[in-house]
Amino acid sequence: MKHDVFISYSSHDKAIANAICSALENHKIRCWIAPRDIIPGLEYGEVIVDAISDCSVLILVFSEKANNSVFVRKEVERALSKGKILVPFRIDDILPTKALEFALGNTHWLDAMTPPLESHIAVLSNTIIHLLKREVPLTEPSKVLTEKESIQAIESIHPTTSSKQKEPVLVHGLKISDSTGNETILTEFGIVYNLFAEKNLSNAIRGHLIIEKGSSIQEIPWNQIEKIDIRNMEAGSILLKDRKLLDPVKFRSGRIVGKEESGFTVVLDLANVISIQPIHKKDIEIKSVLTSLTTSITNHKDGSQLVLIPEGEFWAGSRRAEEGGRPFQVKLPAFYLSMFTVTNSQYTQFLIEADPEQKELDQWIKLDSRNFIRMAGGGFETWGEKDDHPVTGVTWYGANAYCEWAGLRLPTELEWEKAARGNDGREFPWGNEFEGYRCKWSGSPKKPGEETTCSVTSYPEGVSVWGNYQMIGNIQQWCADDFDPLAYDRYRKGDFSESSGLEKVIRGSYYHMGIGELLRCATRSKASPSSGNAQIGFRCAKTY
């Protein structure tokens, strides 16, 4: 559905942007805001371009961080090129950079630098109402609606599709049970429509579902699903909002995104889910323990999502000599690992803030025609519409410097392998058979703009059991360890002392690899830490 307002902001100002969004939507003004309205699996750049094209007004939350954000500047430039109304909402007392000043021109500013913020948001709301020529009194203040008012407001924007459906039900959460008897409480769902019996899902759930119907693979956003019937652990039927029935289908994977009681975002894999029930505030217990279900957190410095890899044993290695001679079990403490590899846009932001001298820059990344970051106007920018592709040409030193800047670290080789293989030692993130449609390799279709790398959000059907994308395919990835050809022999014997060598470990595989055997999760590779190869990137880890 077309929206009225696009909200452009730096991730550091997310709380204020969300407050603006809430206030406007209380006035029945439809907003588009990331990451809420980004459907997983779609190209990030295309989604942003379409969202700006479909809005009437772009609100810029202008702050010190937004002032230096390449993303924010591009969103502003895109909006102006499309003739959209621009409303800057200034929360920091600073002047815009020359690039942003040129884009903004003589646009009138709304200043919100003095408390209380709520009064400035009320003025902003009235300004937007006026610009959209809505028949709402300009004196009406922003307010928090009651539960009854919330139901009426959202019902007017998202009407139900059938008069025979149940009335909207206000619930405070969902209780999800898995096949091992564990239960997880998700809260803060707000209004939930079309709630059916146990084992059915509502259209308030965000995320996507990947199914197999016949010989085809389909990805369906949850908000298109009216009802889902899980008959067993793998199969069932789906009723879509347009009343189309898909029956039978096989559930390949899926993601349900909500809020756990602690406030962390929880990402659940459908594979283990056997029931989903509505709950009310009086039924919510203090906290539930997540075991086989996956928790993800957001790192506010760079905006990356990291998924929790739980403590426990997993099968590492293989029968190959350099991989231990035979599979063996290793117990690791819990840790977090990035859901996606670091993108060109993220690394560009790092370079802008770090402002390295030329010698240091050369040590971190090889800026040439093989990657999509370049120097511009005394700073750095992405080019070639590859913002959401993985950064490449980055050395081990450059990857390590980024992690330190973001307050994270590189994963160890064993952490990387557990994230890729799960607990059961599978050959590939999805199982023991190579299936080329699940990853970016030499046999993948060459789509325009994806002759080499692709978006880090592509190939959701190839995620690991924990929810990490592209553990194989697209690019290889730096690990923290020095490369030791006998390391896995030592690990198998219980010796986990640090390796010492002149080269660093790289794991995973890249877009030009053409043999499925080389794409195995257990495959070990190495490179000089100063190597800036076009097929090597990285992802970040965090100690639990």
Image (cartoon, rainbow, N blue to C red):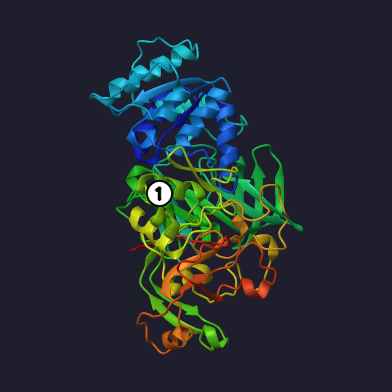
The answer to whether residue 116 is left or right of residue 519 is left
The answer to whether residue 228 is left or right of residue 324 is right
- In the image, residue 211 sits, relative to residue 515, either above or below, namely above
- Which residue in the rendered view is the most extreme toward the front? 359
Type of the residue with mark 1: Phe
Q: Where is residue 104 shown, x and y percent of the image?
A: 45, 22
Q: Where is residue 318 shown, x and y percent of the image?
A: 55, 83
Closest to the observer, 49 or 37? 49
Closest to the observer, 228 or 216? 216
- In the image, residue 220 sits, relative to residue 540, either above or below, namely above
Q: Quadrant of residue 114?
A: top left
Q: Quadrant of residue 404?
A: bottom left
Residue 159 visible in the current orientation: no
Closest to the observer, 45 or 379? 379
Q: Where is residue 187 shown, x and y percent of the image?
A: 39, 46
Q: Quadrant of residue 11?
A: top left
- In the image, residue 280 sits, relative to residue 502, either above or below, namely above
- Which residue in the rendered view is the most extreme toward the right? 215
Q: Where is residue 79 shown, x and y percent of the image?
A: 53, 26
Read off the residue under disc 1.
350
